[in-house]
């Protein structure tokens, strides 16, 4: 409750100050509440192919993560799913932003987890509760940053999640390392799949032109 109330109050203050700086004028809403089209789309061949390829990539990365019993391996299929977009350009952009966000979030979480690593007793209890509030504030602000800057959104979410995951063992930074590693592997798989798909599509189109 404290985290949500503090986050809401902070954003109200920021938007109020921005409103004053801009001359107290009403401006259009910067982000739609439901961005993108939500109408039904006709099932076309490219749409079906992309859905099939994405499903296969998700199945493969999930099988790797849980079949090999990878530590924190669930981040691998998540990174793959999020990074894979209908075009190679979109996939590259999202992959770079997500990887940058994972790195920033891991570093931020690691620095914050230095605080409780040397504390004991009542001070450790108080610091842990304080960091839990910080993590919840980061998660709440991450949602607000989603449509403003995707890299900062990933950084805020990663930092909040990693703080909560590592609080029981603040001196063990394995989660941070695995988060970056599996994010790198996931976005790499997405880029490879979309690159391979693009090459196959060009080869198929070239073959059809040759036969015609």
Image (cartoon, grey):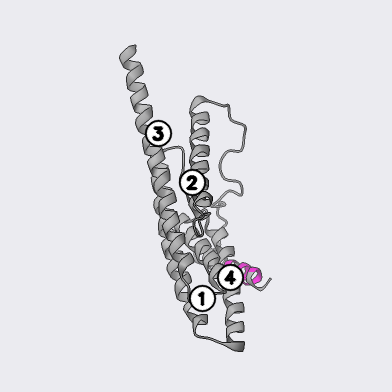
x, y percent for residue 91: 42, 44
x, y percent for residue 174: 46, 67
In the picture as drawn, the residue positioned furthest to the top comes out as 212
Question: Does residue 67 sit above or below 162 in this rendering?
Answer: above
User: Distance between the Cα atoms at labels 3 and 4?
Assistant: 45 Å
Identify the mark nearer the N-term, 4 or 1.
Answer: 4
User: Distance between the Cα atoms at labels 2 and 3?
Assistant: 17 Å
Q: Residues within 10 Å of mark 2 (few under 14, many from 20)?
A: many
* Residue 178 visible in the displayed image: yes
Q: Is residue 51 magenta?
A: no
The answer to whether the residue labelled 3 contacts the one labelled 1, judged by CB atoms less than 8 Å apart, is no
Query: Start and end of the magenta stretch?
Result: 4-11
Which mark is drawn over residue 10? Answer: 4
User: Distance between the Cα atoms at labels 4 and 1?
Assistant: 28 Å
Q: Which residue is mark 3?
A: 197
Q: Which residue is mark 2?
A: 61
Image quarter (top left, top right, bottom left or bottom right) of the N terminus? bottom right
């Amino acid at each position: 409750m404290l985290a949500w109330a503090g986050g809401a109050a902070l954003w109200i203050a920021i938007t109020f100050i921005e409103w004053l700086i801009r001359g107290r004028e009403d401006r259009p809403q910067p982000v739609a509440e439901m961005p993108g089209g939500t109408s039904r789309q006709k099932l076309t061949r490219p749409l079906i192919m992309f859905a099939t390829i994405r499903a296969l990539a998700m199945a493969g990365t999930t099988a790797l993560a849980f079949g090999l019993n990878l530590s924190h391996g669930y981040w691998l299929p998540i990174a793959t799913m999020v990074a894979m977009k209908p075009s190679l350009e979109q996939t590259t952009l999202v992959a770079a932003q997500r990887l940058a966000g994972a790195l920033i979030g891991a570093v931020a979480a690691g620095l914050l987890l230095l605080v409780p690593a040397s504390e004991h007793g009542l001070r450790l209890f108080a610091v842990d509760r304080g960091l839990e509030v910080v993590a919840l504030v980061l998660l709440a602000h991450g949602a607000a940053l989603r449509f403003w800057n995707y890299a900062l959104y990933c950084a805020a979410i990663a930092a909040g999640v990693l703080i909560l995951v590592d609080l029981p063992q603040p001196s063990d930074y394995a989660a941070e390392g695995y988060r970056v590693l599996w994010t790198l592997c996931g976005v790499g798989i997405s880029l490879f799949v979309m690159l391979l798909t693009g090459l196959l599509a060009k080869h198929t189109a070239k073959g059809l032109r040759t036969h015609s």
